Structures are given as C-alpha cells and as structure tokens.
C-alpha cells in the first residue's frame, strides 16, 4: 500500500515541481508574480507610479479594505459570507461620528472601542439569525445589508455629518503619523498579525478551518460548529466596526451612502487572495495580497489613462480567474487521490 | 468480574414506524475482533450507530464495562472510548494529516497557543507506533482512500479508543492494502483493543475475526466463535428465511434480444460485463451494495461513459453518450435514490411525469398544457398513483407513491427497455406487492426490464434470469430454475478467483 511508501515528492502530479503549477497552487506565489508584472507594466507606462509617496497612498487606501477583507475571509472559510459589512460600516460610521460631534470633549481614542462594540452588536445579530434562525448566511446577511442601511437613514434622518463638524483630533485618528506610518496602516498591520496568530495558533482558529472543510466531521471531532459559526460573524462585526471608525475619520464625514457596495470589494480581496469559496482554505498573506492587488489596480487606472469605470469589470475578471483556478486545483487534487 | 467490555441487551429501534432492529443482543470482549454479518438492510449500520450514540435505542440497554450507559450523541461515545470509522470517511480535506488526527484536540501550550511542534511530533509518534508511513504535512484531500483510513485509525487511537468499529473498511481497498489493514487490526487486538468489524467478504472475516454475530432482517440470529463456523454455515444464517409468494412474476415467453451488452468496462468501477436482455423478460442484477451494478446501469443510460465494450440496442450497435440519446433509443432508467435523482420534490406530479418528454408537449418552446396534463393523468392512472390530484407536490407523497410517479414518468416516454435500480427499497410491503405486480404487467406487455436489487427474495421472485456482480465483475448467471439464495450470496461474496466451487 502507498501508506508504506509515501509517494516521494515530485512523483505525484499534485506535487510535481512545475513552475506554473506552483504558481497556481500556491496562491500567494501566483498573485505576487502577477502583482510584480503589473507594477513593472504600469511603471513603464507611468514612472510616477513607483514612488514612495504613491505607494504610501496605496497602503492608505487599502487599510480599511484589508481589515474587513480579513474578517470576510474568516467567514468565507466557514463556508459562509457576510454581505452586510458595507451597511455595518455605514451605520457604525454614522453613529460614531454623531457621538464624536456631540461630545468633542470625549477623548478621541474612545471612538475606537465604541465603534468595535457597535459593530460587535450588529455582528452578533447576524450570527444569531444564522445559527439560531438557521437562515443561510447569504440570505441572512442580505437581509441585514438592507436593514442596517435602513437604520442609517433612520438614525441620521437623512442628514450628513460633514468635515467641519468633526474635531481635528478625530480626523487625525486615521491619518496621523506619530509612528512614521499613518495610524490606519499600522492598525491594519496589527489586525493582520493578530488574525494570523488567531487562525494559525489557537484551537478556535483551527476549528474555523475544520468547520469549513467538513462540517459533519467537525461535529464528530467534538467541535461546536454553531459556536464557531456564531463567532466568525461576531468577529466580522467587530473588525468592521473598527474599519467604520477609520472610514469616518479618513473621509472626515459620515453619509447615508457611506460604504455602499464595499462588501463586494471585501469578498473580491478574500477570494482573489485564495480563500476557497467552498470553505476550509485561506491564508492571511493571501488576503493581504488580494487587497494589495485591488489597491494597485484602483490606483493605477488613472495613471495609465484607463477609465476608473473599468475597475469593477477588472475586479470581476480577477474573481472569476481566482475561482476557476481554485476549482481546477480541487479537481486535480481529487484526480490524484484515486 | 465482567468479561464483557460492551454489552447490548434487547435493542430495538424503529424509523418512522418501520422496525429496523428487533431485540438485538450483542457482546464484545476486550482484545477480540468481532465480525458483524448480515445482508444489506439486516440492521448492521443501525446497530453501529446506536453503539456510537448517533441513534438512541427505543428499547433495550447498553452496558459498558458492566455499567449502563446512555450516549446522547457521538461525542459521548467518543469520550467513553468508542471510535468508529464509517464507510464515508470523515476527514477534513483541507487540513493536513497531523492536524486531521488531532482536530478539535490540538495540544496547546500554557498560554493557549497551539503547539504545532508537539502536534507534529505526537502525530509522527502515533503513526510510527501504528507502523504507518505518511507525510504529516500532506493535505487529506490528496491521500488515497487507504491512507485516509489510516489517518482515521490514528485519530481513533489518539483518543485511546478501547473499542474500534470499522464499517466495511476493506470495500474500496486493494488486496495489498487489505493486508496492511489486517496487520494493523491484529496488532491492535494484541494490545487489547476490541474491534467490531463489518464486511461482506466472508473469507476476510473467516481469516480475521474471533467471533461472529449474524443479523437478519433486523433480528439477532446467533453469535459463534469463528473457528466453529464455515462459510456455508454463515451464508445459511444470513439467508435462513422462506420466500413467500409476495413476488408474482407472470410467465412470459421472452422475445427477441433488445439489449445486448458485451465486455462493457469502465475502468475503476466495472469490468467486462456481458449480458443479454430479451423482450418481456425481467433480468435480475444481484450483488452487494458497491458491486458496480448501478454504475453499469448508468453506463448503459449514458450517464457515465464506459471505457471499453459494446452495447447493442434492438440489434443495432450504439454508443450512448447522453441520457437524451438513451431515451430516444427507447431506454428508461429509474434510479436508486428517488429523492436525489428520480423526482423533483418541489414540483407537482404532472410536471414530474412530463419532465423527460417536455419537448414533445412543446411547440416553438411553449408548453401545450392540455397534452401534458392528459398524458400525465393517463400515466398516473396506469401506475395507480394514490394522490389527491395530479397537482399534488411530489414531496407530499409516500415513498411508494413517489416511486410510482417515477415509474409513470418513465413510462410516459414509452420505453422498450426499462432499468430499475432498487425499485422497492424503503417501501412498505403493500405498495411493494403493487409495484411487483406492475413490473410483471409491464414485462407481459413486452417491455424488457433490467432490475437491480439487493433484496434476494425480490431477485428470486421477480427475475426470469439472474446475474450476480461482485466488485465490478459478473460472478454468476442463473436461470430462474437454477437460482437459489445460497448460490446468489455465494457469487456475490466469493473471491473472484474461486468461482466454480459449488456449495
């Protein structure tokens, strides 16, 4: 039996040392190469792309996306999806901005835990509908996507909170650079490190992969499936709440349409970064690269004189390419099993 | 002092009114391999699920080490040291070998951090102690079935299982892999683990098991030391029932050959299958679950393409590559799993019946309702479907009536060759008799029927001829007069190499 002689690396097609195969199989490698090619190509057309300033700009732009995409990735790993993140951003940003406006005397740092707490409440609601209500995640969060957006209007009575109404300290919360890099970028890095540690070095983190990879087997292994499912939506709310505070601070406003359509970008970053839509697989570096790729495209389109209207279409193509390669990998892996 | 590690007393269990286990008793000693034997549907799997706490018995008690226990789910039984390896493996395809072994129980450091180094070290030690060589970092998705089984066994051992249940572990292994598995099982036995081993391969059980308990139709038959029984004796215990006249097959003189299959092969699932099917004849296709019978049917119907061999329909050589083509050639296939392949539960009876023939009822893409309704009604009447109206949803019907709708659906295509896969599985006795009468009537009207069935009485009662498959090969062919339960079981369970030895 093969168990006695494990296939030597390089003999089975799944592990064949084939450059293209490696790039396809290890998403981080593939996407890195793609990003490099893209950077070179854009720089050739427009040398101003490859400057420290521009790169800092890109990082600033993808910080919020990264935070929410990491949360989204955790949800997708459990075979779920959280479509409500964009409305959570809208609602939390509106509420936090309102509190900050009304209480300028409040220490501005307090806005961060406030936003996270509000987000956690919204995420808890999602989790309860999905676990107790037994509603499929896509339907449940589609529902709360509308509900939370409705609450934004209800809460704000249709008005905006504008830049001049917000204290300067709140605006600097995201953009200040006391540590050299903008706070927002540092926060995103911290979140990424924490999520990485959580997913790879805690039992709960590993349970998230187990539940997504084979829910029934997870139960047999004594993993509390419902609790894990609930938890990822709670975390999604928590991180989205954080992102919402940064959003309000960065754009110095809270509007009724804040974050509109953002959920698709987070799903795109996760899926392009190699998070499997059938659950069970995904890495933090992959998601970071996925977000970076989206950020580069967004940033570079005007530089190379392509209408930003193309952005969505390009994003769509990337998602499809990512999912198709995933399917090919699964199919190929299954073929080698027999 | 109690010598029984596990004891079941008078276990009964019913599912929706049908009793699948009746007063079954079972004992297990430490350090023995105990074979659980019975025909398909004898209740083995249900018994296993009761031991592992997946199902709870309606009556009877379970004693573990002499103490009564109650398992309310699979976690309880695991904690009590009972591990089961099911036919469908339960690994995490995206996790690696080591993590699969410890999933949900990863070793952690004092700080609560998963101790990966320890996890790999312990997984390595465990596999070494089992004498299994596997790459610890390989993803489960890419392992062979045999390797996956090894991971499951290792997982069972990581929880210090005293009782290991293996449900048909050898059914998808090669001979060489079976040897390795047996070596492992013997070793575990030597270390004091009690093993419940389910298999249909009698030779295997005779070679491996210490004792055997036979179940038949949900009842306990006997427990014997393996040394004291013979192959033949086991078969007799498994069969041991009289055939009633529940299966009335009208005598028909078979007509010309309508379907001829020659050396049909699909690599990996069946090999060199040949048979002829005549007008008005019912050909029974017997064998155990997983013998490749369904695959043959699916190949003939164009669902799975054969890799070699020839098919002739009504004398013409054909290459069937799609169900549409099969339907046009006059074939119909009633699949095994009604819910999954045969019916659309959320549609009403009419739509279900007209589904394969929609093109006939449509003109320029628009359905012509009246014709559709009329033929559906006629087909439903012919099949004696009991429903409030032909607008009732399929899912609201009883199992037997669902099966009638499926039959009506295919009869509306006016097939000349009808393939029925387990036509009466899970259907109550009364409806079963009605279905058998219908099949008989259809045959008398000149339809050629290929009937796959795992129920021996049905095979013996309904078939004009019987062919038996085992592990993808035809291992026996009998006329109605020749066929007996013993011969069929023997052909279905015998090693391919020893065919020809008569009982």
Image: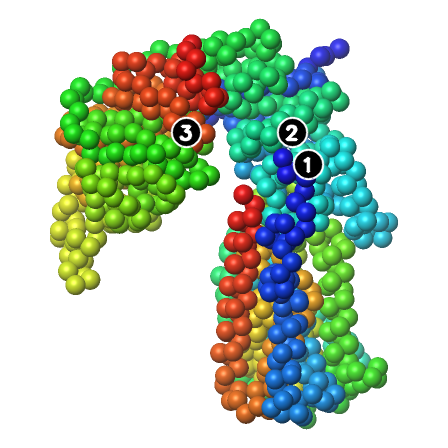
- Quarter residue B274 falls in: top left
Q: Are marks 3 and 2 on the same chain?
A: yes
Residue to which mark 2 is pinned: B180
Residue to which mark 3 is pinned: B473
Name the chain letter of the residue that bears numbered label 3.
Answer: B
Residue B13: x and y in percent read 50, 24
Where is A43 relative to B286, above or below?
Answer: below
Number of residues whose C-alpha sits closer than 10 Å to that of mark 2, classed few (under 14), some (14–19) or many (20 or more): some
Lateral position of residue B131 relative to residue A253, left or right: right
Callout 3–callout 2 Cβ contact below 8 Å: no
Lateral position of residue A123 relative to residue B494, left or right: right
Number of residues whose C-alpha sits closer than 10 Å to that of mark 1, classed few (under 14), some (14–19) or many (20 or more): few
Name the chain letter of the residue that bears numbered label 1.
Answer: A
Q: Nearer the viewer, residue A22 or A264?
A: A22
- At x 56%, y 57%, the residue is A329
Residue B238: x and y in percent read 46, 15
- At x 43%, y 32%, the residue is B472
Where is A30 relative to B477, above or below?
Answer: below
- At x 53%, y 24%, the residue is B199
Cα distance, mark 2 to mark 1? Answer: 9 Å
Callout 2–callout 1 Cβ contact below 8 Å: yes
Q: How many marks?
A: 3
Q: Nearer the viewer, residue B260 or B217?
A: B260
């Amino acid at each position: 039996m093969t168990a006695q002689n494990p296939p030597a690396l390089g003999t089975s097609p799944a592990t064949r040392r084939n450059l293209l195969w490696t790039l396809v199989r290890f998403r981080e490698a593939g996407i890195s190469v793609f990003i490099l090619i893209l950077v070179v190509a854009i720089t050739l057309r427009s040398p101003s792309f490859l400057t420290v300033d521009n790169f800092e700009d890109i990082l600033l732009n993808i910080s919020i996306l990264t935070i929410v995409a990491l949360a989204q990735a955790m949800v997708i790993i459990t075979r779920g999806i959280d479509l409500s993140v964009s409305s959570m951003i809208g609602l939390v940003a509106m509420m936090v901005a309102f509190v900050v406006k009304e209480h300028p005397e409040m220490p501005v740092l307090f806005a961060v835990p406030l936003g996270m707490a509000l987000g956690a409440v919204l995420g808890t609601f999602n989790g309860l509908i999905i676990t107790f209500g037994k509603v499929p995640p896509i339907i449940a969060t589609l529902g709360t996507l509308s509900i939370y957006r409705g609450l934004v209007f209800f809460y704000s009575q249709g008005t905006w909170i504008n830049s001049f109404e917000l204290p300067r300290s709140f605006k600097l919360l995201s953009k200040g650079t006391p540590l050299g890099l903008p706070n927002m970028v540092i926060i995103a890095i911290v979140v990424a490190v924490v999520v990485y540690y959580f997913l790879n070095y805690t039992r709960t983190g590993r349970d998230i992969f187990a539940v997504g990879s084979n829910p029934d087997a997870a139960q047999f292994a004594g993993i509390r499936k419902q609790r894990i499912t609930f938890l990822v939506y709670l975390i999604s709310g928590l991180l989205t709440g954080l992102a919402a505070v940064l959003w309000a601070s960065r754009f110095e406003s809270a509007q009724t349409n804040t974050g509109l359509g953002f959920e698709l970008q987070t799903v795109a970053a996760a899926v392009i970064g190699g998070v499997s839509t059938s659950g069970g697989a995904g890495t933090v570096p992959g998601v970071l690269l996925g977000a970076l790729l989206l950020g580069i495209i967004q940033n570079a389109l005007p530089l190379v004189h392509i209408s930003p209207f193309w952005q969505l279409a390009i994003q769509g193509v990337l998602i499809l390419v990512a999912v198709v390669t995933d399917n090919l990998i699964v199919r190929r892996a299954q073929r080698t099993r027999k | 002092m109690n010598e029984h590690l596990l004891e079941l007393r008078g276990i009964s269990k019913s599912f929706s009114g049908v009793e699948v286990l009746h007063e079954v008793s079972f004992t297990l000693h430490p350090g023995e391999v105990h074979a659980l034997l019975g025909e398909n549907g004898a209740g083995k799997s249900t018994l296993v699920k009761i031991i592992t706490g997946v199902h709870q018995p309606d009556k009877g008690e379970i004693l573990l080490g002499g103490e009564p226990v109650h398992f309310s789910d699979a976690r309880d039984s695991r904690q009590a040291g009972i591990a089961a390896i099911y036919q469908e493996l339960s690994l995490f395809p995206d996790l690696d070998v080591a993590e699969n072994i410890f999933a949900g129980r990863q070793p952690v450091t004092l700080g609560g951090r998963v101790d990966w180094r320890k996890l790999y070290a312990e997984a390595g030690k465990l596999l070494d102690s089992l004498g299994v060589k596997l790459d610890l970092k390989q993803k489960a998705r890419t392992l062979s079935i045999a390797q996956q089984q090894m991971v499951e066994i290792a997982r069972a051992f990581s929880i210090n299982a005293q009782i290991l249940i293996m449900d048909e572990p050898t059914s998808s292994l090669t001979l060489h892999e079976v040897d390795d598995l047996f070596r492992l099982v013997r070793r575990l036995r030597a270390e004091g683990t009690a093993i419940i081993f389910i298999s249909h391969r009698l030779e295997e059980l005779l070679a491996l098991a210490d004792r055997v308990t036979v179940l038949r139709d949900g009842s306990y038959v006997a427990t014997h030391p393996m040394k004291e029984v013979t192959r033949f004796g086991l078969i007799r215990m498994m069969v041991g029932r009289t055939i009633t006249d529940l299966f009335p097959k009208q005598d028909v003189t078979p007509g010309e050959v309508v379907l001829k299959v020659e050396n049909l092969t699909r690599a990996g699932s069946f090999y060199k299958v040949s048979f002829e099917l005549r007008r008005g004849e019912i050909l029974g296709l017997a064998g155990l679950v997983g013998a490749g019978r369904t695959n043959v049917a699916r190949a003939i119907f164009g669902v799975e393409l054969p890799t070699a061999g020839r098919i002739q329909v009504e004398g013409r050589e054909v290459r069937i590559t799609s169900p549409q083509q099969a339907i046009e050639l006059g074939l119909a296939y009633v699949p095994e799993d009604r819910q999954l392949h045969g019916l659309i539960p959320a549609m009403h009876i009419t739509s279900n019946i007209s589904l394969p023939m929609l093109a006939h009822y449509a003109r320029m893409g628009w359905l012509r309702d009246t014709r559709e309704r009329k033929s559906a009604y006629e087909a439903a009447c012919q099949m004696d479907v009991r429903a409030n109206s032909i607008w009732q949803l399929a899912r609201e019907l009883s199992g037997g009536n669902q099966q009638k709708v499926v039959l009506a659906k295919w009869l509306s295509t006016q097939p000349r060759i009808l393939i029925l896969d387990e036509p009466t599985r899970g259907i109550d006795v009364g409806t079963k008799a009605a279905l058998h009468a219908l099949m008989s009537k259809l045959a008398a009207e000149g339809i050629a029927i290929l009937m796959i069935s795992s129920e021996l009485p049905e095979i013996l009662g309904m078939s004009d001829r019987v062919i038996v498959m085992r592990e993808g090969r035809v291992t026996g062919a009998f006329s109605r007069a020749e066929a007996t339960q013993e011969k069929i079981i023997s052909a279905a369970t015998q090693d391919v190499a020893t065919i020809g030895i008569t009982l």
